[in-house]
Each structure stands twice: as structure tokens, then as C-alpha cells.
Image: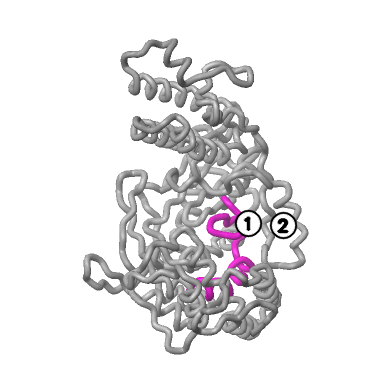
């Protein structure tokens, strides 16, 4: 049976899942999302809700939601029911079950993941059926969120990333007559403290489902614990809901302050900085305004981590350090990030004492390359050379530990070679350790503030932008760096 130009599977899942025309699926969903954007801009909210229901009931959207859940990094991580969407039959059945009237979410499975500071972050793992339902609702909600979002917001949004946020910081601070004071904002437990009443009133999605997800609770060591506030870290819908809660701060700042106050906001998820013309302005006027804005949403600033700094002293943001030297703004990799990549390489080398050289290099190269590409858009050349030297020293110590009885010349002949005009290159002949300093430094062009990936009128802009950035990795920091 053919429907919408795609293969429609019966409920028993006998139709081939991999025969689905995913390009056509995305086009069909994209057309409805474009209509939602148009309705939001026109302020026709009855039309928006009607189109959202139409999208949520479409087979194309249901298939795309299941495909996302069954192919992302968490596809092999089950919820409390232990079920996975790992066969075509299960995927088809789940697609047909989506958006059912009798849908009820299940509790989350609570786990803890380590943070850089040694503490643990709670993570709620939904069952795969709930993830698919959230992915379906996100297809209808995200076009609304993108259309209403603050131009200065860059985290957890399509086609935006940390480099755009850093470019926004550069534009706000680079000139000699720019703001010199910065408020570094840290929201205390943002995902855990968000007000349920605020979310239910202001997030334009299926209210019954949203209420169910917010109140689903979680299982920890076999004990059910209810939830009265917050949105679970680990839920597909949570980042967008949190973004919508924090949107509006930029507009409130612009309405309150004059351009001569030099107040500019740059936000990446729940991390943000606000510039200002003076310390007193940020401390006595901007900070209270932010506190009031957050309080309305059940949130508050962390007094211990929120601080006001001068640009000459510098500050760290998203793994970068921003500081002015004699009036010139320099953006470099932050020292904790440099230490983190060195420690990651050291850990791999210490754990790889019994590995062959080629296997070890294949494990090291993605770490070195990924970190280097993340920092390729800022002043990093000297840092890259420093890290390359540190890694070389680590490989030399690795070689000496493997062969404590061998001399320097034997170790060099065994593990190093002359290659491409360089001596002492760590290689086994078939694979060579990646050299971070070989990465060219290229300026990142910030995305336009009003750019909307769901707007068909801006399609040419995004095609051109993707073409310029092809091969540039990655827009997000490596997971091990920010965990």
C-alpha cells in the first residue's frame, strides 16, 4: 500500500522500514512546519494549533519521530520498561501508536553522570515510547520556538552553535568603545527548577502530554519519586522548553536600557553573559532585572557562580577565554579546556599500554582532531603547538614504559619517523598521529539573528551557509569536554 509517496507498513511491521523515502518524509513535514512559521508570524494562534495537530497526526511526522529516537546516540539506552526500538516491526508498531488518545507517559529512569567539577548531574531516561511522543511534539513545537526565539540565543537550536555565541561576544566586545564590564550569569539548577505552571501556560504544545511528562516522576533504586518542578534532563522536549522559558530576556533588556548603556545579551542554553557600560549599571540595574525575570519562571541566579568582571581581566565562556590586551580583544581556548584535552590524551595513553601503536593512534586521533576543530575559529595556533608538544612527550613516555630496557635510538626507530619534512613523527607507517597545529585557523561567520531554518524564504541563506562551512567540525564541544 502506498501513502504520500512512501511505503506504509501494516501494524505487524512486515513492510521494509529501510525502504522508506526519508527525503520525501522530511519534505512533507517541512511543508507543514513552514506553514506553522507563517501562522506564528501572522499571530494566528488558532491556525498554529490546528497545523500542529495536523502535523502530529500525519504518518510522515510519526515515522520521522520514531526514526530520530531509534537512530540517535541513546538508541540502546532503555527506560524503566527495558524496551528498545531496535527492529523494523517495533518501529512500525510504535509509529502507528503515536498520538493515541489513551497515551499515558511512564516514569523516568534516574541515572547520574559525572560533571567536570567532580559532582554528579541527574539525568532522567524516558522509555522509548515516550521519547517518540516527545519527538513528535517537538516537530510541531520547534518551528514556533524558532520563530519566537531571542536572536541572541544559540544553544539547543537548529543551525546554531557555540561558535555563533562566541562570535556574538566578539561583536559586542571587540571595538574600543564597546562595553567593558560583563555579567557572567549562572542559573542554579535550571532544568530542575523550572516552574510547571509557567511551562503549561506559555509553551504552545499539547497540554495533556506536556503535563504528563512534567508530572511523570522517576524511578530511583526501585522507588517512585514524584516531580513537582523542573523538566527532565534527558527528555527530547526539555531543551526547547527551557529555551522558550528563557526567551524574552533580550527584549526586556532592550525595552529597559538605552543603547548608550551598551547592554548586550549572549545566551547559550542556560549559560549567558550580559555586557554593560559600568559595574554599577550591571550590579544595580541589570542583575535585579534578570533576577525578576527568572523568578517569574521559578528560577534564580547562583550567587556563588554569578559574577561581574572587567574585560581586561577576561572571562571564560563555553570553553573559550575572552580578554582584552591593550585594547585588543583576543579569544583563546580556556585553560580548563586545554587541561581537559591533555588529561584525556594522558588517560588514553596510560590505559593503552598493551595496545599496538596503530590502534592507539586511531583512538587518539578523534580526540585531538575534534578538540582542534572546535577551537579552529579563534586565536589557537600557539595553543595547538603547545598541545602537540605535550602529546609528543606523552607518546615518548608511553614508548619508554613499553620498553624500559631499550635505548633512545631504538625507540625512535621503532615508533617515530621522518615524514612531510618533520622528524620524530609518531607513526607505524600505516597511520600517523594527527598534528593539531596542521589545522588552519578560519574565522567563523555568525548566523543572522533572525535566521529561521523552518522558513522556506530563507532556504537559500542556509544552503549558502552550509556550503561555506562544509568540512568544519564541530559546532558543539566534544561531549567529554563539557560533561
Residue 85 appears in the figure: yes
Residue 129 is situated, as x and y percent measured from the top left of the image, at: 43, 75
Q: Nearer the viewer, residue 175 or 76?
A: 76
- Residue furthest bottom in the image: 101
Residue at (46% x, 23% y) in the render? 392
Find out whether residue 140 is within the magenta segment: yes
Q: Is residue 387 left or right of residue 151?
A: left
Label at residue 462: 2
Q: Which residue is nearer to you in this view: 62 or 150?
A: 62
Q: Is residue 204 above or below residue 301?
A: below
Q: Residues within 10 Å of mark 2 (few under 14, many from 20)?
A: some
In the rendering, which numbered label is found on residue 159? Answer: 1
Between the residue at mark 2 and the residue at mark 1, the CA separation in whole angstroms equals: 8 Å
| 120 with respect to 101 (left or right) | left
**Contact, CB < 8 Å: mark 2 with mark 1?**
yes
Residue shown at the point (39%, 74%) measured from the top left: 214
Q: Which residues are magenta?
A: 133-161
Q: Is residue 193 visible?
A: no
Closer to us: 254 or 215: 215
Q: Is residue 23 above or below residue 473?
A: below
Q: Residues within 10 Å of mark 1 (few under 14, many from 20)?
A: some
Marking on residue 12: none
**Mark 2 vs 1, N-terminal side:** 1
* Residue 471 % position (x, y): 66, 44
SS assignment at label 2: helix
Identity of the residue drawn at 74% across and 67% down: 456
Q: Residue at x 44, y 29 (%)?
A: 357
* Kind of element beneath mark 1: loop
User: Is 55 in the magenta?
Assistant: no
How far from the left and from the top, in percent, is residue 467?
A: 73, 50
In terms of image quadrants, where is residue 396? top left
Q: How many marks?
A: 2
Amino acid at each position: 500500500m502506498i501513502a504520500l509517496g512512501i511505503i506504509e507498513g501494516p501494524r505487524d511491521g512486515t513492510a521494509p522500514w529501510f525502504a522508506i523515502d526519508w527525503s520525501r518524509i522530511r519534505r512533507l513535514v517541512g511543508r507543514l512546519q513552514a506553514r506553522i512559521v507563517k501562522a506564528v508570524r501572522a499571530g494566528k494562534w488558532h491556525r498554529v494549533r490546528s497545523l500542529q495537530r495536523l502535523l502530529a497526526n500525519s504518518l510522515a511526522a510519526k515515522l520521522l519521530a520514531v526514526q530520530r529516537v531509534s537512530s540517535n546516540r541513546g538508541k540502546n539506552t532503555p527506560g524503566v520498561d527495558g524496551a528498545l526500538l531496535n527492529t523494523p516491526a517495533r518501529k512500525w508498531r510504535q509509529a502507528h501508536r503515536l498520538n493515541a488518545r489513551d497515551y499515558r507517559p511512564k516514569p523516568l529512569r534516574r541515572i547520574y553522570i559525572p560533571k567536570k567539577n567532580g559532582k554528579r548531574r541527574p539525568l532522567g531516561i524516558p522509555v522509548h515510547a515516550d521519547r517518540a511522543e516527545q519527538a513528535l511534539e517537538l516537530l510541531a513545537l520547534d518551528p514556533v520556538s524558532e520563530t519566537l526565539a531571542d536572536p541572541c540565543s544559540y544553544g539547543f537550536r537548529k543551525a546554531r552553535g557555540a561558535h555563533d555565541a562566541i562570535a556574538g561576544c566578539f561583536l559586542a566586545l571587540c571595538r574600543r568603545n564597546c562595553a567593558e564590564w560583563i555579567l557572567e550569569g549562572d542559573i542554579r539548577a535550571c532544568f530542575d527548577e523550572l516552574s510547571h505552571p509557567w511551562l503549561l501556560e506559555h509553551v504552545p504544545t499539547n497540554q495533556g502530554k506536556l503535563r504528563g511528562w512534567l508530572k511523570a516522576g522517576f524511578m530511583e533504586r526501585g522507588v517512585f519519586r514524584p516531580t513537582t518542578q523542573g523538566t527532565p534532563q534527558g527528555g527530547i522536549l526539555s531543551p526547547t522548553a527551557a529555551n522558550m522559558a528563557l526567551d524574552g530576556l533580550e527584549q526586556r533588556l532592550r525595552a529597559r536600557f538605552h543603547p548608550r548603556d551598551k547592554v548586550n545579551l549572549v545566551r547559550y542554553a542556560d549559560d549567558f553573559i550580559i555586557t554593560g557600560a559600568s559595574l554599577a549599571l550591571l550590579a544595580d540595574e541589570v542583575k535585579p532585572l534578570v533576577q525578576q525575570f527568572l523568578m517569574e519562571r521559578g528560577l534564580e541566579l547562583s550567587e556563588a557562580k554569578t559574577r561581574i568582571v572587567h574585560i581586561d581581566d577576561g572571562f571564560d565562556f563555553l570553553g573559550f577565554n575572552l580578554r582584552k590586551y591593550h585594547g585588543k580583544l583576543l579569544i583563546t581556548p580556556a585553560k580548563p579546556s586545554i587541561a581537559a584535552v591533555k588529561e584525556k590524551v594522558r588517560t588514553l595513553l596510560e590505559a593503552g599500554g598493551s595496545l599496538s601503536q596503530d590502534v592507539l593512534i586511531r583512538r587518539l586521533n578523534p580526540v585531538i582532531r575534534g578538540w582542534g576543530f572546535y577551537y579552529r575559529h579563534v586565536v589557537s595556533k600557539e595553543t595547538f603547538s603547545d598541545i602537540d608538544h605535550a602529546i609528543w612527550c606523552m607518546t615518548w613516555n608511553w614508548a619508554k614504559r613499553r620498553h624500559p630496557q631499550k635505548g633512545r635510538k631504538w625507540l625512535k626507530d621503532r615508533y617515530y619517523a621522518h615524514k612531510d619534512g618533520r622528524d620524530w613523527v609518531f607513526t607505524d607507517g600505516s597511520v600517523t598521529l594527527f598534528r593539531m597545529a596542521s589545522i588552519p585557523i578560519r574565522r567563523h561567520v555568525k548566523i543572522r539573528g533572525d535566521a529561521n531554518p523552518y522558513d522556506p524564504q530563507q532556504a537559500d541563506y542556509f544552503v549558502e551557509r552550509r556550503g561555506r562551512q562544509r568540512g568544519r567540525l564541530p559546532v558543539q564541544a566534544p561531549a567529554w569536554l563539557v560533561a
